[in-house]
């Protein structure tokens, strides 16, 4: 814009460069994961963890993350295979080291049964997920009742108890043998559950119950009232699971929901010294789960370490020369800006950025020349044998390497989305014509004209 090129020309050039970049990436840079199988997924998970707090234990956690994502495979109505990240529940437990973390098959709830007298294992579970308080009903504030006879007072008390007992009877008659609720259950209600041999869990998190309802096919209900105001509970609102059991995992008791009917589920129990470390570990594992999900759903990966950006930089510089209009300058600038990624990576690792980026550019330029049929036979054989198109930065050793062999991989869909988001953000800024700048508000007493 400083060169007096109109923003619409730059926008057109950037959109053209983006379209060519995505096309080139899909055709020449991305690698189908069918050929790489589990190893590629582990490499993607490791690459995601490399700069995080669990980077030193990436071998252990990458296997756990890949197993968790493969365990939650499901198909939607259109027959597409999906890997929902939310189906993997992450629990945090204090104590021990990071390598004591475990992967559990089934959905783990950080709760215990409401009473020690209850059964701790239910086979062929019919699960009710509720947001209802199972405690004796109390009159609402502001309600006044005038009583003539003390017997009527006793009847009111009995009705208060009877209302909640009727609700529980209704749920148990529908076939429920596991009841999960976000609210409380008092002793009178617990007695009823124990007598019927049902498992009841109170004070569950709403988010957990929503996920369990989705996985088991249950309905998450916040009231039993129907449209007519009557209370009823249908068996169709119940979810199914092979087993619901209370197990001791590490130092805590957890409820595990195994063999859910609608979607399979898995849970990761993280161990760590304190809350801060556990929170950081949870974020790192979540990032890796998302990276593995993207790889599984898109079915292709690209080499990391600045390889994609350098390849696109070389390709777009060549492409800019073939565009015979003023968009050429915008495309050339787009190509130049992509080198920021490998340069920043090298600077962050305290390496010589200019030297490394120059080596990367020469490798990728040679690779693209040989692809187009240019160059002599020796150059072609070297470029093919060494896989120059996959070359990126190895910042541990401070040199350029084949990222495919080094196992530094990223989901190709993530790279495409990053480019698209960056271009859209840039275009949004360029569409702004005028910037109104307000002077900062003056503080202090106003001058009265006499210098006071």
Image (spheres, rainbow, N blue to C red):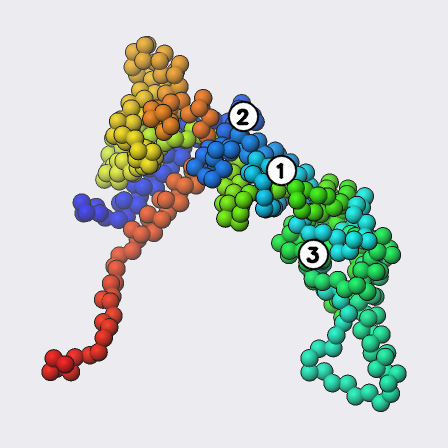
Q: In terms of depth relative to the viewer, which is nearer, 434 or 351?
A: 351
- The first of marks 1 and 3 along the sequence is 1
* Residue in the foreground of this view, choosing between 260 and 82: 260
- Residue drawn where x is 36% and y is 16% of the image: 383
- Name the one closer to the observer, 390 or 245: 245
Q: CA distance from mark 1 to mark 2?
A: 21 Å
Which residue has dot 3 on it?
220
Task: For the residues labelled 1 and 3, say whether their Cβ atoms are less than 8 Å apart.
Answer: no
- Measured in 3D between alpha carbons, the distance from the residue under mark 3 to the one under mark 2, in whole angstroms, is 39 Å
In the displayed structure, 413 sits above or below 112; it is: above
Q: Residues within 10 Å of mark 2 (few under 14, many from 20)?
A: some
Q: Is residue 102 left or right of residue 116?
A: left
Q: Secondary structure at mark 3?
A: strand
Label 1 sits on a secondary structure element that is strand
State the image coordinates of residue 202 (x, y, percent, origin top left): 71, 57
Q: Secondary structure under badge 2?
A: helix
- CB contact under 8 Å: marks 3 and 2: no
Kindly report which numbered mark, 3 or 2, lies closer to the viewer in this rendering: 2
Counting residues from the N terminus, which is met first, the one under dot 1 or under dot 2? 2
Q: Which mark is residue 94?
A: none
Q: Earlier in the sequence, mark 3 or mark 2?
A: 2
Q: Residue drawn at (75%, 45%), measured in percent from left and top?
A: 245
Residue 361 drawn at (x, y percent) = 29, 26
In the picture, the quarter occupied by the C terminus is: bottom left
Q: What is the number of the mark on residue 39?
A: 2
Q: Which mark is residue 102?
A: 1
| Residue drawn at the location 48% of the way across and 33% of the way down | 56
């Amino acid at each position: 814009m400083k060169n007096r090129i109109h923003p619409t020309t730059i926008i057109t050039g950037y959109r053209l460069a983006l379209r060519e970049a995505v096309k080139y990436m899909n055709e020449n840079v991305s690698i189908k994961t069918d050929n790489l199988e589990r190893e590629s997924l582990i490499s993607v998970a490791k690459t995601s963890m490399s700069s995080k707090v669990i980077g030193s234990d990436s071998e252990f956690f990458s296997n756990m993350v890949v197993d968790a994502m493969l365990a939650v495979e499901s198909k939607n109505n259109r027959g597409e295979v999906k890997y929902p990240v939310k189906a993997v529940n992450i629990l945090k437990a204090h104590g021990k080291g990071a390598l004591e973390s475990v992967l559990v098959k089934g959905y783990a709830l950080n709760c215990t049964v409401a009473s020690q007298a209850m059964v701790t294992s239910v086979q062929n579970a019919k699960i009710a997920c509720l947001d209802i308080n199972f405690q004796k009903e109390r009159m609402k504030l502001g309600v006044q009742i005038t009583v003539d006879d003390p017997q009527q007072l006793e009847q009111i008390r009995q009705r208060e108890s009877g209302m909640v007992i009727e609700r529980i009877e209704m749920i148990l008659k529908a076939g429920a043998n596991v009841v999960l609720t976000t609210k409380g259950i008092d002793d009178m209600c617990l007695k009823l559950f124990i007598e019927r041999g049902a498992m009841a869990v109170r004070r569950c998190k709403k988010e957990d119950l929503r996920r369990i309802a989705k996985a088991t096919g249950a309905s998450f209900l916040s009231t039993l009232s129907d449209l007519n105001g009557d209370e009823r509970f249908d068996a169709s609102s119940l979810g199914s699971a092979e087993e619901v059991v209370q197990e001791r995992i590490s130092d805590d008791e957890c409820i595990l929901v195994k063999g859910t009917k609608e979607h399979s589920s898995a849970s990761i129990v993280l161990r760590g010294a304190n809350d801060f470390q556990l929170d950081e570990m949870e974020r790192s594992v979540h990032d890796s789960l998302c990276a593995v999900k993207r790889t599984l759903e898109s079915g292709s990966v690209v080499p990391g370490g600045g390889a994609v950006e350098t390849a696109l930089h070389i390709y777009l510089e060549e492409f800019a020369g073939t565009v015979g209009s003023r968009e050429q300058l915008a495309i050339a600038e787009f190509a130049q800006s992509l080198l920021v990624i490998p340069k920043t990576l090298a600077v962050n690792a305290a390496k010589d950025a200019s030297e490394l980026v120059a080596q990367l550019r020469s490798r990728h330029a040679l690779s693209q020349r040989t692809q187009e049929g240019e160059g002599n036979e020796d150059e072609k054989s070297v470029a093919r044998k060494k896989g120059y198109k996959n070359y990126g930065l190895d910042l541990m050793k401070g040199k350029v390497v084949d990222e495919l062999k080094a196992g530094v991989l990223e989901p190709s869909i993530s790279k495409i989305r990053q480019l698209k988001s960056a271009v859209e953000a840039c275009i949004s800024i360029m569409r702004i014509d005028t910037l109104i700048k307000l002077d900062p508000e003056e503080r202090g007493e106003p001058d009265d004209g006499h210098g006071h």
